[in-house]
Image: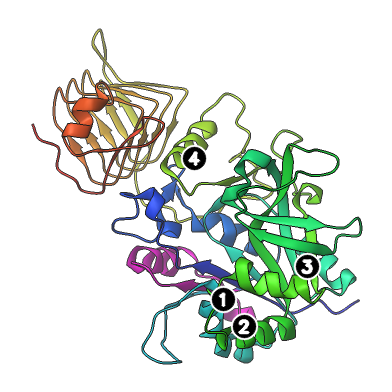
């Protein structure tokens, strides 16, 4: 039997997530809850673990307590085979400074690579929603002899300025890498599309170590994995592209194959959550052949009580997690995380309620994201009059979604 390559997973989880404020006011972006039961970081970690890569370092920095606790409590792998998912804060090994970019984060943690001694390193972002078998990407990387392989997906050309854009030849070698271009040509076979980097890379270890060491000496560098490291490797002819559409995940259907969403804004985060509750969601949380792993709360089952006119506990086209009590309230097209309580006569529509939210009697909540442990007073109105919501200091997204931060107080 052929010897399996030794692969180390490195998950970049230090993102501040300014565009997700106030959801990132008290936590790092990868720790933001998603889909009722999960955190954003769970998707990258699940893909690596399901793909057979179970030695993973999660590099953290910004307001990392919530993320560190989640990893410690949820991602405890068996030590018998030296498997681990470990949270690694900024250690200041090169002076009293924080990470100055994603490439600098790896440079400051080269000791992890030296201790593990891997043949290849998967460097994955931690804030996207997708399923992917990384072993297929590693296999292509080895066969091509590349120094780095960049996972890419087709996106509309109009959205190119949000991504690193790849220009590759017919063999897959990357000719140019454009970081968030404002104007760029589309693909030859589809002028209205471009190949966007997913923020997932496979490196040969020697290539990555050498690249970040050289980058650390460049005082003009922004120390970014895409804009600096990959761009430099493109210039030296060592970069290849991996077409994400070729990735085959067990249990995937033609409808959800190739699904990938960047949830970096409040509207994209909201829309991705809303997709989960459609009749036939594009992203299928129920694919048990490639599960998304997360912590299991020790809570009782959800409960729906009362069956009287004006006082009926119902949920339609919604996802309801453990510990939820619908005490005579009505929920439509929404996601209710663990421990949510909806009281009599309350109406919740097209909303995302995080753990511990309490919706008072007769309150109405529409098109809203309400973070953990918020109490909505009886008869309150949220999402009904956006100008009134704005005057009360609530965040309103460009798409008109009302966002209330963790633990915020809503006046009676």
How far from the left and from the top, in percent, is residue 361? 17, 23
Q: Say whether residue 83 is magenta.
A: yes
Provide residue 138's location: percent of width, then percent of height: 78, 67
First reached walking from the N terminus: tag 1 or tag 4: 1
Pointer 3: what residue?
138
In this view, 6 is above or below 190: below
**How many angstroms separate mark 1 from mark 4 (CA)?**
26 Å
Q: Which residue is mark 1?
A: 103
Between 275 and 214, the one lying in front of the other is 214
- Give the CA separation, mark 3 to mark 4: 29 Å
Q: CA distance from mark 2 to mark 4?
A: 32 Å
Position in image of residue 167 (x %, y %) = 78, 56
In this rendering, does residue 243 appear at all? yes
Residue 374 lies left or right of residue 85; in this view the side is left
Quarter of the image for residue 120 reads bottom right
Contact between marks 2 and 1 (CB within 8 A): the answer is yes
Q: Residue at x 62, y 26 (%)?
A: 280
Residue at the location (62% across, 53% down)? 181
Helix, strand or loop at label 4? It is helix
Work out which quarter of the rendered image holds the N terminus and state it: bottom right
Q: Which residues, given as a range, are shown in magenta? A: 56-84
Name the residue carrying label 4.
Answer: 268
Disc 2: CA contacts within 10 A as few (<14), some (14-19) or many (>=20): many
């Amino acid at each position: 039997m052929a010897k399996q390559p030794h692969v180390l997973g490195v998950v970049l989880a230090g993102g501040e997530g300014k565009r997700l404020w106030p959801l990132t006011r008290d936590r790092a972006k990868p720790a933001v809850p998603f889909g009722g039961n999960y955190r954003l970081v769970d998707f990258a970690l699940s893909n690596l673990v399901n793909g057979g890569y179970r030695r993973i370092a999660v590099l953290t920095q910004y307001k990392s307590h919530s993320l560190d606790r989640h990893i410690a409590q949820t991602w405890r792998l068996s030590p018998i085979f030296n498997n681990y998912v470990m949270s690694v804060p900024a250690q200041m090994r090169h002076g009293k400074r924080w990470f100055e970019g994603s490439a600098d984060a790896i440079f400051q943690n080269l000791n992890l690579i030296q201790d593990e001694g891997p043949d290849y390193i998967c460097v994955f972002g931690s804030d996207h929603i997708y399923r992917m078998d990384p072993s297929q990407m590693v296999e292509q990387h080895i066969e091509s002899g590349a120094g780095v392989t960049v996972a890419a997906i087709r996106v509309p050309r109009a959205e190119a300025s949000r991504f690193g854009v790849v220009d590759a030849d017919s063999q897959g070698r990357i000719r140019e890498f454009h970081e968030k271009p404002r104007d760029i040509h589309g693909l030859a076979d589809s002028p209205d599309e471009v190949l966007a980097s997913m923020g997932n890379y496979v490196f040969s270890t020697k290539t990555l170590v050498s690249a970040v060491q050289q980058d650390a000496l460049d005082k003009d560098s922004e120390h970014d994995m895409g804009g600096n490291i990959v761009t430099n490797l493109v210039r030296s002819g060592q970069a290849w592209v991996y077409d994400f559409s070729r990735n085959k995940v067990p249990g995937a259907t033609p409808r959800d194959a190739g699904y990938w969403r960047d949830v970096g804004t409040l509207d994209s985060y909201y829309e991705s959550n809303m997709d989960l509750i459609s009749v036939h969601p594009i992203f299928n949380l129920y694919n048990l052949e490639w599960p998304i792993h997360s912590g299991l709360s020790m809570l009782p089952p959800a409960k729906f009580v009362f069956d009287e006119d004006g006082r009926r506990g119902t949920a339609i086209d919604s996802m309801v997690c453990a510990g939820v009590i619908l005490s005579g309230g009505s929920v439509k097209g929404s996601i209710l995380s663990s421990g949510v309580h909806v009281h009599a006569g309350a109406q919740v529509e097209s909303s995302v309620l995080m753990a511990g939210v309490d919706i008072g009697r007769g309150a109405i909540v529409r098109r809203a994201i309400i973070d953990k442990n918020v109490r909505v007073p009886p008869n309150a109105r949220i999402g009904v009059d956006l100008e009134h919501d704005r005057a009360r200091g609530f965040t309103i997204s460009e798409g008109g979604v009302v966002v209330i931060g963790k633990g915020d107080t809503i006046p009676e």
